[in-house]
Amino acid sequence: MRLDKLLANMGYGSRKDVKELIKKKRVTVNDYLIKDSGMKIDTTSDLVKVDEQVVKYKPFIYLMMNKPPGVISATEDLYDKTVIDLLPPSVQHYRPFPVGRLDKDTEGLLLLTNDGKLAHQLLSPKKDVGKTYYAKISGTVTDEDIEAFLEGVILEDGYQTKPAKLSIISSGELSEIEVVITEGKFHQVKRMFEAVGKKVVYLKRLSMGELKLDNTLKLGDFRELNDKELSYCQSMK
């Protein structure tokens, strides 16, 4: 990889900016001052420094966020704050994007990455990756609803969902449930409950496959995936 491309990818500005860094003698490779911004770099063995700070090359970034309500799952928007707006510039330069979407008023687990192959695998209907949600439902959730979800409910547009596993935590005027779906249709959980005559009033995603929301993350906080979580992601590719 070219030195200017590496440094640009790691957030040191444009290739023109990198040339200025080199011109000002702020860049070394293997402790030698460099004059050529197009120098080829072995990212596994060459030691690159800017102002004596080691530059660790990472092609991909994998983040777990506890998405807050009121923020949309998009990379940019003209009107609303996005999940990318919650990230510092040091992370934004990787150009991460949300894997799938959570509705604006839905909170919980959201994976952000710049690894398109992983995103495709996690979202592919063929992979049947289970997504677990906790919800509060206006209306009494019954065993009949559990059976309906297992068979797949018919949405208002005529689409029949794939089977979903519905579990009742408490049942009453305001029921609490967990549901596992393997699809990601628009407003799917809300529409599934509407199909059985009930309304979702609170929704939170708890897990996506083996990725589980870190309960220590406050709303709007994020962290990089740990080794176990990364291993799972790599196994999906």
Image (cartoon, grey):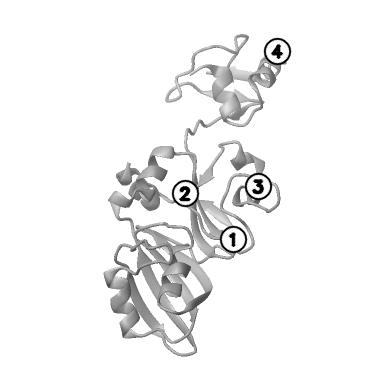
Q: Secondary structure at mark 4?
A: helix
Q: Nearer the viewer, mark 2 or mark 3?
A: 3
Res 68 → quadrant: bottom right
Residue type at numbered disc 3: Asp
- How much space separates mark 4 and mark 2, taking CA atoms? 40 Å
Give coordinates of residue 83: x percent, y percent.
60, 52
Q: Nearer the viewer, mark 4 or mark 2?
A: 2
Residue closest to the eye, 25 or 203: 203
Q: Quadrant of the C terminus?
A: top left
Against 132, residue 177 (above or below) is below
Against 107, residue 138 (above or below) is below
Say which residue appears at 33% left-offset and 56% top-offset. 129
Q: Nearer the viewer, mark 4 or mark 3?
A: 3
Q: Nearer the viewer, mark 4 or mark 1?
A: 1
- How much space separates mark 4 and mark 3, taking CA atoms? 38 Å
Q: Nearer the viewer, mark 2 or mark 1?
A: 1
Question: How many labels, in total?
Answer: 4
Asked if the residues shown at circle 2 and circle 3 are in contact, with their CB atoms under 8 angstroms apart, the answer is no
Residue closest to the eye, 237 or 69: 69
Residue type at numbered disc 4: Lys
Asked whether, in this view, residue 192 is left or right of residue 150, the answer is right
Any mark on residue 99, and which? 2
Against 191, residue 1 (above or below) is above
Say which residue appears at 46% left-offset and 74% top-offset. 194
- How much space separates mark 4 and mark 1, taking CA atoms? 46 Å
Residue type at numbered disc 2: Val
Residue type at numbered disc 1: Lys
Give coordinates of residue 70: x percent, y percent.
64, 62
Say which residue appears at 53% left-offset and 12% top-offset. 39
Residue closest to the eye, 126 or 199: 199
Any mark on residue 77, and which? 3
Asked whether, in this view, residue 177 is left or right of residue 221, the answer is left
